[in-house]
Image (tube, helix red, strand yellow):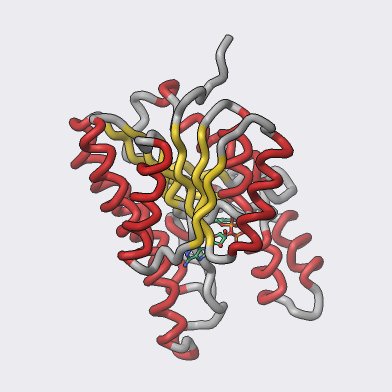
Amino acid sequence: MGKMHEGKVALITGGSSGLGLSTAIDLAMEGAKIAIVGRRTSALDEAEKEIIAHAPDAEVLTISADVSSEEGVKKFVDETVKEYGRIDYFFNNAGIEGTQKSLLDYDMDDFREVININLLGVAYGLKAVLEVMVKQGSGSIVNSSSVGGLRGVVNQSPYVASKHAVAGMTKNMAAEYGKLGIRINAIAPGAIKTPMVAEAFKKMNPADPEGAEAAFAANNPTGRLGLPFEVAYVVSFLFSDKASYVNGQIIAIDGGQANQY
Ligand SMILES: NC(=O)c1ccc[n+]([C@@H]2O[C@H](COP(=O)([O-])OP(=O)(O)OC[C@H]3O[C@@H](n4cnc5c(N)ncnc54)[C@H](O)[C@@H]3O)[C@@H](O)[C@H]2O)c1
């Protein structure tokens, strides 16, 4: 049997770390050609090595760009099409958590940064990639929302606002583009063991981040945090034709935590 994603082209923002990198590895192992976008060239170089270590025949394009720049986003989309001729899958995933403070204490420059990356960055990506996919008449997009796109998270107003916005855009744009052969879904991960979440536990309890993590895990129906590959498999499924009638959904990947009282 052939590989699941043989010959498909996948563009992944935030592809140098965490969920983006893990998904890049899984898609590459299943035969996809990969373009990863991140901010730091050194991290992108390391990520490319890691992808090749898992999938020695993989084609990997690395592009350093900031998703909060509309021009920058257009450029990396153009570069991907120039290299591979098309874009089949778009993991619109780059994002930041911001600082953890209640709104009264929140520095509004920090608030704007979260919105510029998590909301506008995702919108720029959708706009530029959809132009390509509409011409193709096909494509599958997965946006990274969060359980913070389904529920409130104390001290994370801009993050939660941005992730609710991503969930809303996903539903809206799925309604607009379904007829054109394009599916748009979102994932809503809970706490998955990535560098972002390690930082979050440090912010929650600088004196004892391990304690903060253990308390969080104890509250989860599975008693643990998620692992990046457990998200990658769901993204891979959503991209594939096996999910051909799944559109406009926000899929929680959180061990059941967001649904418990
Ligand atoms: N890890 C989790 O538990 C979790 C939970 C819910 C949602 N998410 C979301 O999933 C996505 C990935 O999270 P992660 O845990 O892998 O984080 P991470 O910090 O490990 O990786 C984030 C990636 O995004 C990139 N990035 C950040 N800002 C960027 C910008 N302005 N331009 C270009 N690239 C940028 C970074 O370079 C990095 O590659 C984020 O949108 C995050 O909000 C993660």
Q: Is residue 147 visible?
A: no
Give the quarter of the image for residue 117. bottom left
Nearer to the camera, 256 or 31: 31
Nearer to the camera, 193 or 80: 80
Vertical side of 257 occupied by 156: above or below: below
Q: Position of residue 184 (x, y in %)?
A: 33, 40
Vertical side of 73 occupied by 53: above or below: above
Screen quadrant of the N terminus: top right
Quarter containing ligand 1?
bottom right
Say whether residue 179 is left or right of residue 225: left
Residue at image point 43% right, 55% down: 150
Q: Position of residue 23 (x, y in %)?
A: 58, 41
Nearer to the camera, 216 or 46: 46
Q: Position of residue 47 (x, y in %)?
A: 65, 51
Q: Is residue 183 visible?
A: yes
Say whether residue 181 is left or right of residue 10: left
Q: Position of residue 103 (x, y in %)?
A: 45, 84
Vertical side of 184 occupied by 220: above or below: below
Residue at image point 71% right, 35% down: 54
Residue at image point 43% right, 57% down: 149
Residue at image point 44% right, 21% down: 242
Looking at the image, which residue sits at the far front? 82
Q: How many marks?
A: 0
Say whether residue 118 is left or right of residue 178: right
Give the quarter of the image for residue 73. bottom left
Give the quarter of the image for residue 123. bottom left
